[in-house]
Amino acid sequence: MEKLFNNTQVAFELKSDTELDRAYFLFKMISNQPLVRIGAAVTNFALNANLPVEGLIRATVFDHFCGGINENDCLSVVDKMHTKGVSAVLDYSVEGKEEEEQFDLALKMTLKTIDFAKERNAIPFAVFKPTGFGRFELYQKRGENQALTAMEQLEWDRVVARFDLVCSEAHKKDVALLIDGEESWMQDAADDLVTEMMRKYNKEKAIVFNTLQMYRWDRLDYLKKIHEQAKKEGFFIGMKLVRGAYMEKENVRAIDKGYPSPICSSKTSTDVNYDAAITYMIDHSADMSIFAGTHNEESTYFMMNLMEEKGIKTNDNRVWFGQLYGMSDNISYNLANHGYNIAKYLPFGPVKDVMPYLIRRAEENTSVAGQTSRELGLIKSERKRRKDN
C-alpha cells in the first residue's frame, strides 16, 4: 500500500507557522522524561497555590492538546478540522473527581455533547469515562464481587442510572457513544455495565461502544466471548480498540499485590494483540463496529489493507480511525484526505481540572518509544518544506 503518512503538507495544512513552532517546542520538552516529571510537579504546585499560571498553560500545552475550556469554545476547532474531513469527539476531560455533584456534572456535559453531535455532522460520537459517573473504589468493589453496603448499593444504582440515561439519549438521537477503558482492577464492573447497555441499545446497530485496551493479554479472548454472547442474544458489538494508558500503574500494582501482570510481556506482543483484534473485528464487520484508536502507523496500514481485502469502503460507517487532538496529524489528515472515517478526541474543560489529563498525555508520550521523535521529525520536515517554498 502507498505510504501516506509522510505527507506533511496535508498533515499540517491547518497549522500556522507560529502553531507549528509551538508544537515543535512542546514535543521537544516532552521528549525529556525528567523534565516532564519536574514540569508536572511544578505545574500542579502552581495551580494548587493559585499562582497566576493558567494563562501560560492555556497559551502553550492546553491550546495544543485541548479544544477549549467549555464545549462552545471547541466549535471553532471542530469546524476548522472538518474543512479537511476530520471529525471531532468532544471529550470532557475532567478526571479524579469523587463527589456526586461532580458525577452529575459529567452526566450533564455528556448529554450536552450528545446534543452537539446530533446537530453536527462534524461530531459523530460522544464519549465519557466510567469514573466520570461514579467512584473508582465502587467499581472495584463491585467487580471483585464484594458485598456493597446499603449506602453503596444506592450509590451504584445512581451510577447505573447515569449510564442508562446517557445510552438511552444516544440511542434516541442516533449518536454513537464511546465509553473509555480504565485500570484493570475496576474494569470488570464497567465491562459488565457497558455490555448491559449494548444488550439494551445495540439491537439495530452499534450505538454503545466499549473500549478494549489491547496491552492486556486477556482482551482478545474477552472480545471473542462477548461476540458469542452478542450473537446468541441478538445485539451488535461496538468496540474502541486502543493499546492502553496505564501500563506503569498496572505493572507496579501487580508486583505489589503479587499477581501476574495483566499487561503483555512486550511491546511486540501488544502490537500482535492489537492487530489480531483488528483482524477479528474486520472479519466480523457484519455485526461489529470498530473505532481504532491508534497513533501507530503500521497498525493503521494493516487495517487499511484488511478493509481493501474485505471490500470494505473507506467511508463505511462501521469502521473509524481515531487519534488524539494535537498528536499524529500526519495520520489523521492523510487518512481523511483519502476518504477514510477519522475522528480526533478533542478534550475540553477548565484548565485546572484538565491538568491531570494533560500530564498523563505528556507522560505517555515520553514512555512510547519513537512517538515524540516521530512528531518532531515530521514538524522539522514541514518547517523545512515551508522555508524552501
Image (tube, rainbow, N blue to C red):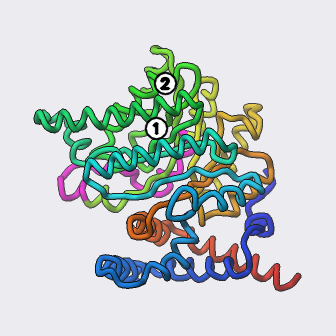
Q: Nearer the viewer, residue 228 or 75?
A: 75
Question: What stretch of residues is rendered in magenta?
Answer: 253-277
Closer mark to the observer between disc 1 and disc 2: 2
Picture coordinates of residue 49 (x, y %)?
29, 81
Q: Can you say whether 218 is above or below 332 in the image?
A: above
Q: Which residue lies at the image location 53% right of the left edge and 39% below the top edge?
A: 277
> Mark 2 is on which residue type?
Tyr
Residue 291 lies in quadrant: top right
| Picture quadrant where residue 162 is located | top left
Residue sitting at x 56%, y 41%: 115
Q: Is residue 210 visible?
A: yes
Return the mark for residue 210.
1
Picture coordinates of residue 253, whole percent (x, y): 24, 57
Q: Identity of the amino acid at label 1?
A: Asn
Would you name the residue on which mark 2 appears? Answer: 201
> Is most of the magenta stretch helix, strand or loop?
helix
